[in-house]
Image: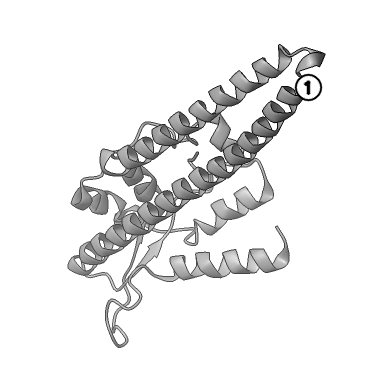
Amino acid sequence: MNASRLAVVTVVAAALGVGLLAGAGKGRAETTKIATVDVVELLQDMLQTPQYAEPRDANRNTSVAELAEMEDEMRRIDAELRMLTPADQARGQRLYSDLQQRQANYRDAAQRRSAEFQALSGQQAAEVYARIHEAATAVALAAGYTHVLASRDGAAIEDTDSLPAVIQGLLARPAILFPAADDLTDKVRERLAIPVSQAPGQSEPGAAEGNVGQPDQP
């Protein structure tokens, strides 16, 4: 990760960790009382609920079906090309040009589908965060808290495959030490009726789409 990108990520993470309740009230509180909420855990679990998972699944299935149909047509033309004799040169050239065009169309469709899935996933994550923010604010204010840090608990970082992944895990933990009694994650989960997810995160829809971009995605 280059220095400029790391700086941007650091600023964003700092803004998230500084306080979930920034702007919730005006003026300086006479007594500071700080709570924490594991926003990442809640966001991941909420995104796996049917309300959000089913639209992604539908998008993925549509992508897979569209690309599979295009793949079948390309395989058909390729098989036809292999059966041609030298006497079929003119027809072979036409088929080859058709195949090249279909391959280009396939790449465009895969990229478009990947972008659509990315956009859907991003919109869902933003919506879920807004709901978590609202619920956390209500829970915290009712309990007399003046600040809420969005922070994961503990030092164990799950993804250690790369330095950027580790840094992301670090930035998700701006609070190193806090009393368990001040963690409002379970109360926010209860308020939003978010079940504890046992399933791993969604992967991209279809191998073909996964080759051209990344989401959970096509």
Q: Residue at x 39, y 39 (%)?
A: 59
Q: Position of residue 157 (x, y in %)?
A: 55, 45
Residue 210 is left or right of residue 183, and the answer is right
Looking at the image, which is closer to me, 158 or 129?
129
The residue at 41%/59% (across/down) is 178
The answer to which quarter of the image holds residue 211 is: top right
Q: Residue at x 45, y 36 (%)?
A: 63
Model colouring: one colour
Res 212 visible: no
Name the residue furthest right.
86
Most foreground residue, 204 or 175: 204
Label total for image: 1
**Please, what secondary structure does the residue beneath circle 1 have?**
helix
Q: Residue at x 39, y 53 (%)?
A: 125
Relative placement, left or right, of 40 versus 90 is left
Residue 53 is left or right of residue 93, and the answer is left
* Residue 105, position as x, y percentages in the image: 59, 40
> What residue occupies the far bottom of the structure in this picture?
27
**Where the N terminus falls, by quadrant?**
bottom right
Residue 109 horizontal side relative to residue 147, left or right: right
Residue 173 showing in the rendered view:
yes
Q: Which residue is mark 1?
A: 89
Q: Position of residue 218 (x, y in %)?
A: 50, 38
Task: Bin the neighbour count of mark 1 within 10 Å (Cα to Cα): few under 14, some 14-19, many 20 and up.
Answer: few
Q: Nearer the viewer, residue 103 or 85?
A: 85
Percent x, y of residue 82 = 72, 14
Closest to the observer, 91 or 161: 91
Using the image, determine if residue 46 lies above or below residue 134: above
| Residue type for callout 1 | Gln
